[in-house]
Image (cartoon, rainbow, N blue to C red):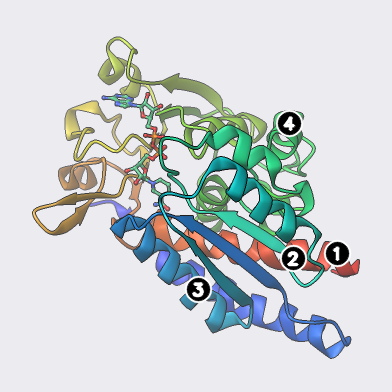
Amino acid sequence: MAQTLDGKSLATQIETSLRTEIADLTNAGKPPPSLAVIQVGDLYASKVYVRRKHQACQRVGINSQDICLPTTTSEQQLLAKISELNTDTSVDAILMQLPLPQHINTATVLGAIAMSKDVDGLSPQNQGLLLSGKQGSAKVLPYPSEALLKPKLLIPCTPLGIMQLLNHYRCRLRGKVAMVVGRSALVGLPISQLLLQADATLIHTHSHSVEPKLLAKTADVLVVAVGVPHLVRQDWLKPDAVVIDVGINRQQGKLVGDVHPDVAEVASYITPVPGGVGPMTIAALLQNTVLAAQARHRVG
Ligand code: NAD
């Protein structure tokens, strides 16, 4: 049976070290880091995720504010709110909870968040830095870079959390075949970029890919971020592959991933759902918020 890549436990360790970093900041006379989370509308799943983010902030000593706007909020009103937060010196980091209602252009809104406060790393500027390899994922290690344990730039939270988990369990990437299923700006595209920068050989598939199962059979590392319950079955897998299941799907009142549990019989490592990538995403959000605060106060 595969070994569990325990995101919950690693996230707890990261929270412990963040408490020290935040204490260093406040002992130096600086205010604690602060995060503004904006949610438009009242999607139940978004509310749950936002609540977990605030609880995590509280655990480590980050001041978080909840900005809940009605579904009827116009794009102009949302942009005005972001502009206000961009210039508010008491706010270090801004997180736009996705998805947005259909009448709002997501790319326009994400592009309006100040680069230094863009804690999800989804603004065009931060995406560009990631593409240019400027975020510090050095090429010196066979594992995901140690530099990612303390990134210098704001990298999207889920991919950052995944790389930290792979690093923690010493899952080798250099020269390995890594396959990413799904190409969202939130997960699929940035994780591909980080895997390439860690010297993996990349296969990237999506909804139009032909024979993904055949391609998956060659993958040493498989990252699945699709949103289709149990899409990946045992017969997709190369024996001893490392499997990262990003999917969070609700099925008969239960949370299930994009990967069927029987995959654990063939894989060497696998992330559980829940308790794998989810807690690491929140840990990465906390780290990015602290990083944004340290950058503003020029410490760390
Ligand atoms: P998305 O809907 O933005 O993107 C899904 C991608 O999957 C698209 O690129 C699409 O082309 C591709 N796709 C759809 N059907 C496919 C198929 N049959 N085969 C191959 N590719 C297919 O979703 P997202 O934001 O990337 O999220 C994906 C999943 O991950 C969702 O279940 C989401 O809830 C979950 N998620 C989890 C976390 C976490 O912290 N664990 C974070 C973000 C997203």
Q: Are marks 4 and 2 in contact (CB under 8 Å)?
A: no
Q: Residue 135 in the image: x percent, y percent?
A: 76, 43
Alpha carbon of mark 1 to alpha carbon of mark 3: how far? 21 Å
Which residue is labeled 1 in the image? 296
Q: Which residue is mark 3?
A: 54
Specify which label sits upstream in the sequence, 4 or 2: 2
**Given the image, on which type of amino acid does mark 3 rest?**
His
Above-or-below relation of 122 to 254: above
Could you give the CA–CA distance between mark 4 and mark 2, rounded to whole angstroms?
Answer: 21 Å
For the point 91% across and 66% down, the residue is: 298
Q: Who comes first in sequence, dot 1 or dot 3? A: 3
Foreground mark, 4 or 2, reads 2
Q: Are marks 2 and 1 in contact (CB under 8 Å)?
A: yes
Crowd class of label 4 (few under 14; some 14 to 19; many from 20; radius 10 Å): few
Residue nearest the observer in this picture, 66 or 125: 66
Q: Name the spot of residue 9 as percent of width and height, x first.
A: 44, 71
Say if disc 3 is inside 8 Å of ligand 1.
Answer: no
Task: Please state if 163 lies on the left or on the right of 151 as rendered.
Answer: left
Secondary structure type for disc 2: loop
Amino acid, disc 4? Gly
> Mark 4 vs mark 3: which is more N-terminal?
3
Q: Quadrant of residue 15?
A: bottom right
